[in-house]
Amino acid sequence: MTPAVDPGHAGLWTLAWRRLRADRLAMAALAVVAAFLLMVLLSATGLVAADWEDEVAVNFAPPTFLGTPPDAAGTNAAAQAVPDNPFDPLAAELRALRAELAREHPEANAPRRPTLPFGADKWGHDIVAKTVKGGETSIIVGLVAALLAVGLGTLFGAVSGFYGGLVDDFFNWFYSVFTAIPSILMILTVAAVLQQKGVLTIVLILGLTGWTGPYRLIRAEYLRHKAREYVLAADAIGASSWRRMFGHIFPNVSHVALVQLSILVVGFIKAEVILSFLGFGVPVGVVSWGSMLNEAQNELLLGKWWQLTAAAVAMAVLVTAFSLLADALRDALDPKVK
Amino acid sequence: MGVTCCVMRYRYDFSGALAPLPGSVMPAFLLRRLGQMLPTMLGVVLLVFFLFNWVGGDPAYILAGKMSSAEAIANIRRQLGVDQPYYVQLGIFIKQVLTFDFGQSWATGEPVGQIIATRLGPSLTVLVPMTVLETLIGIALALAVAFVRGSLTDRAVMIACTVGMSVSILVYIIVFQYGLAYRLGLFPVQGWSDSFADNLLRYAPLPILIGLTVSIAPTLRLYRSFVLDEVNQDYVRTARAKGLSERRVMWVHVLRNASIPIITHVMANLPALLIGAFLLERFFGIPGIGREVILAVERSDFPVIKAITVCVAAATMVFNLLADLLYRAVDPRVQL
C-alpha cells in the first residue's frame, strides 16, 4: 500500500468505509442491522411494543389482516359465545357464569385488534410485538456479551502480546485451558454452576467464556506492533506502557476487535436462543427468541405455526444480515486476508 | 503452508518463538507435546474445581433438597468432604481424576464412570456416520464450488450458506421432526432401542439428516477456503503448465493437499462434536453424552458434569495431538 499515491492520505477507516460503500450487499446488510438496532432502541425505551403483554386477541388467533371483519362485538366473549341450546338444562347457568366472568375480567371484553400479521400466542398476545420484545432481549444479550468478551480478549491479548515473557506464558496457558474445553460444554458447565437465572447471568456466561477468539488475534497484532517505530518513538518521549498499549497501538489494531465483535454478536445471539430454549437462559417472564421457540415447539403440534415462523424469520434475517456485514467488514478492514 | 498449520503451531507454543525442532525428532516432539499437555490438564482440573467448589456454592443444599435438617446437611457435607479445607478438597478431586472414579451421580446414584461408558455408544452411532458423510459431501461440494470460484454461482452458494447458517438449529430440528417424522411419518418421531442395527437404520437417520443440513454450510465455507488456499500455489501452476486437465488438477493435485487441513480439522473437532450434538440427542431421545450433560445441568448433577468436562477436555487435547501427528505424517513440509 502506497499512501503517497493517495491524494487525501485517507486513513484505514476512510478507506474501509469506501470499500464497504462499494459493496451493495454489505450496504443492504448494514441497513437491515441498523433497522434491527433501531427497533431494539425503540423497544428498550418503551416507544414500541411496550404493550406486548396486552391480550389483544383470542388465544392462538391465526394471522389476520385488515379486511377480515372482526366478529360482531369484537371481543373474546363474543368469540367464545355458543348459541343457546334449548335442550341444555344448564344453559341458563352457563349464561350467568359467562356474565359473571365478564364482570370479573373486564379485559376479556376489551376490543380485539383486527390486524395481527402473525396472529396471537396462547395468551392472546400480539406476536409481532412479542417478537420485537424478544428481539430486544436476544440482541442486547448478544451485544453486551460480545462487548464483554472482546473487551476481555483485547485486554488479555494486549497485555500478553505487549509484555511477553512470563505474562505471555500465563495467558497462553489460560488460553489453552479454555480452548481445551469445547465452548458449548463450557457454557453449560458455567450455567450449571451459576444457579440463579437472569439476563445478567447469561451475559456473564457468554462473555466470560467467549474471549479466546479475540485474544488470539489481538495478541498476534500486539506482537507485530510492539516493536514498530511509532511505538519505540512513543517510548522515547516517555509514554507509559499502558499509554503505548491503548493510546498508540490499540487504534491500529482496533479493526481486528471490531471484526471479532461482529462475529461474536452473531454467535452469542444464536447461543442465547439455544440456552433460553433449554431453560438455562432468560428467567420466566422475560421473553426472548429462544423462549418463543420453546413455546412454539409444542404449539406446532397443534398446528399453530405462526409464533415459530415469526421468531425464526426475525432471527434468521438479523443473523444473515449481521454475518454478511461481518464478512464485508473483515474484507474492507483487512484487505490482505481473503 | 496453510493457515491452519500456523495456527496449530501457534496454539501450543508457549515460548512464543517459532523455532523448529533440531532434526525434527519424533520422540522429542511427542515428549514436548505431552509435557505441554500436563499444565493444560492441570489448568482444566483447577478451573473445574474453582467453578464447582468455589463459585457453585455448597452442594449439600442442592443434595439435601428443600426439606432438610441441619444435621442432614452436615452429614452430607462430611460425606462429600466439603467441610474440609480447599486444598484437601482439591486433593480429593485430583485423585478422582487420576483414578477415573468420579463417584456416583447425585440424581440417580449410578457410578459416573459407568454413565459415561454407556452413553458413548449411542452418541457415536449418530456421530460417526454423520461426520463421515459431512466430510465427503463437504469435500465434493467445496471442490465443485472452487471450480467456479469468483463466479456468480460461487457467490450465490456462499450467500446461501450464510442464510442457511443463520437459521437456528432449533428451527431445523423442530420443523424436520414435525414435518418428516410427525406429519409424513418417514421416520420415527423419537426413540432408541437396544439393537445397534435398529438404532442405526431406524432411529439415527433423521438426526443424521438434520445434523448434515445444519453443518454442511459452515463445513462447505471452511473447506472452500482450504481449497482456495491451495489453488494459488506454485505446484498447481506447474500441473497446469504440464497440460493436465483442470479436472485432474483439482481432483488429484489440489484435493490431496487440501485434504491435509480437512482431515486434521475433522480429527481435532471430534470431541467437541460429542457435546455439540446435544440438541439432536435431546429432541430425539438418544441416550448419549450430550443429552446426559443437559440432564445433569437441569438436575444440578455436579459429579456427572465435572467428569464429562474433564474427560472431554482430555479427549480434545489427545485428538489435537493426534491431528498434529497426522498432519506431520501426511505433510513432510510441516515442522512441528
Image (spheres, coloured by chain):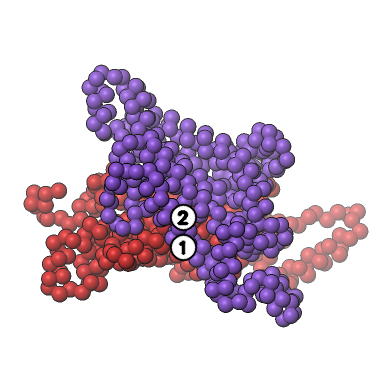
Chain colours: A red, B purple
CA gap between label 2 and label 1 equals 10 Å
Q: Residue at x 56, y 38 (%)?
A: B128
Q: Which mark is residue B215?
A: none
How many labels were placed on the picture? 2
Q: Residue at x 64, y 43 (%)?
A: B122
Residue placed under numbered mark 2 in the picture: A180
User: Between A237 and B47, which is closer to the camera in this rendering?
Assistant: B47
Indicate whether B255 appears above or below B54.
above
Indicate whether A185 appears above or below B217.
below
Residue B41, percent across and down? Answer: 48, 58
Indicate whether B73 appears above or below B325.
below
User: Between B137 and B5, which is closer to the camera in this rendering?
Assistant: B5
For badge 2, the amino acid type reads Ala
Question: Is B333 left, or right, of B160 in this rendering?
Answer: left
Q: In the rendered structure, the residue with mark 1 lies on which chain?
A: B
Q: Residue at x 78, y 55 (%)?
A: A82
Q: Residue at x 49, y 41 (%)?
A: B215
Q: In the rendered structure, the residue with mark 2 lies on which chain?
A: A
Looking at the rendered structure, the secondary structure element under dot 2 is helix
For badge 1, the amino acid type reads Gly
User: Between B17 and B154, which is closer to the camera in this rendering?
Assistant: B17
Judge if badges 2 and 1 mark residues of a common chain.
no
Mark 1 burial class by Cα count in 10 Å: few <14, some 14-19, many 20+: some
Mark 2 burial class by Cα count in 10 Å: few <14, some 14-19, many 20+: many
Question: Is A19 left, or right, of A156 in this rendering?
Answer: left
Question: Is B268 left, or right, of B186 in this rendering?
Answer: left
Say which quarter of the image contains residue A88.
bottom right
Residue placed under numbered mark 1 in the picture: B43
